[in-house]
Image (cartoon, coloured by chain):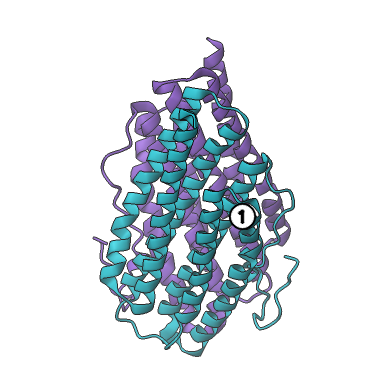
Chain colours: A cyan, B purple
Amino acid sequence: MGSRQRELQTLAGEIAEMGGLAERLVMESVTALTRIDPARARRVIADDQRLDAMQRRVENHAVELIAAHRPTDKPLRELVAALRISSDLERVGDLAKNNAKRVLAIEGRAHPPRVALGVEHMSDIALEQLKSVLDAFTSQDLSAALDVRNRDDEVDAIYTSIFRELLTYMMEDPRNITFCTHLLFCAKNIERIGDHATNIAENIHYLVTGEQPHEARVKADTSSYLPSSFSETPPGSA
Amino acid sequence: MGSRQRELQTLAGEIAEMGGLAERLVMESVTALTRIDPARARRVIADDQRLDAMQRRVENHAVELIAAHRPTDKPLRELVAALRISSDLERVGDLAKNNAKRVLAIEGRAHPPRVALGVEHMSDIALEQLKSVLDAFTSQDLSAALDVRNRDDEVDAIYTSIFRELLTYMMEDPRNITFCTHLLFCAKNIERIGDHATNIAENIHYLVTGEQPHEARVKADTSSYLPSSFSETPPGSA
């Protein structure tokens, strides 16, 4: 194996390490949320800084390799994909951090039982997506990456359903409003983590084939389009 | 002027063009929101695709120049800053698009008068920040960039105040809940547009000086930390 190949492998290793930390931050932020555990939330907020530092390191490293070797074709795409994927993972960390901050806001506030369960279920699926897409990146497995991309609808559909459920709790009792509003933002953050997993899947497609995926993905998060009475079926074509 | 210098200027021109489009999308999305103008909202959603395409073009262009010229020091930083700033602008477009989608969701829904005024005021300031930071990028004006970075607290403080105001409307009348929830997400989107202006300011600092700004910025958006009774003063130290 040539030294350039080794350098690309080192970079891929750095991204895998970022991915592991990003997954952990998401998982811990949701555990902090379901258990209302402020100490855990504060650790997530602190650890996100490490992810930011790792992203800068991957960026420097990729740019150095582009300048040093003037790569073309696949080796160049590996470096561009490294830049893009590390940026997605850094933002996943930011979203986990935002969820953790909200744990500190809702601590001690009364709330309907089981209301965070939907968010936990949603995050299980988003984490599964993130884990699968990072495995697909390591193995450069195009079909596994496209599976992740096609399953993003699942996270979006759960988000739409949680959005409706939380609005119902808020309408039933105004005392739920502040808690449920924070939970809504947490759910939205997790939906966006799913979007980043999809972005990474699309970058694996680009990395392996040299092309961006053609067909525009149909979004199933219709909460932005909820009609006037949100008990109606949302327009799927939106 | 050497050909490399000309190429860097072309790239800076592409970013300025992206910035102009991003500003326009933000402005139009907020006008669509305050006037509840679905046709305008649909144009924002469609035009955001142009911004995405421009970002890919800047990225390709910057990567090509890094590979072609093996730049170091300031010329290299200009290319890295181009990569980062174009990514921030692309996300600003996504946030404007999300606001536009929410216009389609709240169309025809009754809402308290004047409730969108706070969001409009907030977006005026965020847009001013975006415009100033893009001017600072064009002129490589470090002190103007740092001014933008220091004024981000203003957008964050308005966001915190809007967050409270909207929660009050929701508690007063459950019929306001869906409308105000969408408006809350719009306000959060604009607050994040302010964050991207700040990121760009930090990249101008990096571009000009070669260093990331040292002091961590103190965040004034305390809505994630609102205490149990949101009529209390939020902890400023959070």
Labels in figure, total: 1
The residue located at (39%, 40%) in the rendering is: A56
The answer, for residue A33, to whether it is visible in the render is: yes
Q: Is residue B33 left or right of residue B128?
A: right
Residue A168 point in image, percent of width and height: 54, 85
Instruction: Identify the residue at the far top of this view.
Output: B1
Q: Residue at x 64, y 67 (%)?
A: A153
Instruction: Tell me the quadrant of the picture where the C terminus of chain B can be found.
Output: bottom left
For image coordinates 35% across by 86% down, the residue present is A110
Q: Nearer the viewer, residue B185 or A58?
A: A58
Residue B135 in sight in this render = no
Q: Is residue B81 above or below residue B93?
A: above
Res A194 quadrant in image: bottom right
Q: Is residue B113 left or right of residue B232?
A: right
Name the residue that disc number 1 marks.
Answer: A145
Residue A76 in which image quadrant: top right
**Residue B72 higher or lower than A140, as above or below:** above
Residue B167 drawn at (x, y percent): 44, 75
Q: Residue flagged by tag 1: what amino acid is it?
A: Ala
Which chain does tag 1 point to?
Answer: A
Q: Nearer the viewer, residue B74 or B158?
A: B74
Percent position of residue A121, x then y: 50, 76
Percent from the top left, x then y, of residue A139? Answer: 55, 50
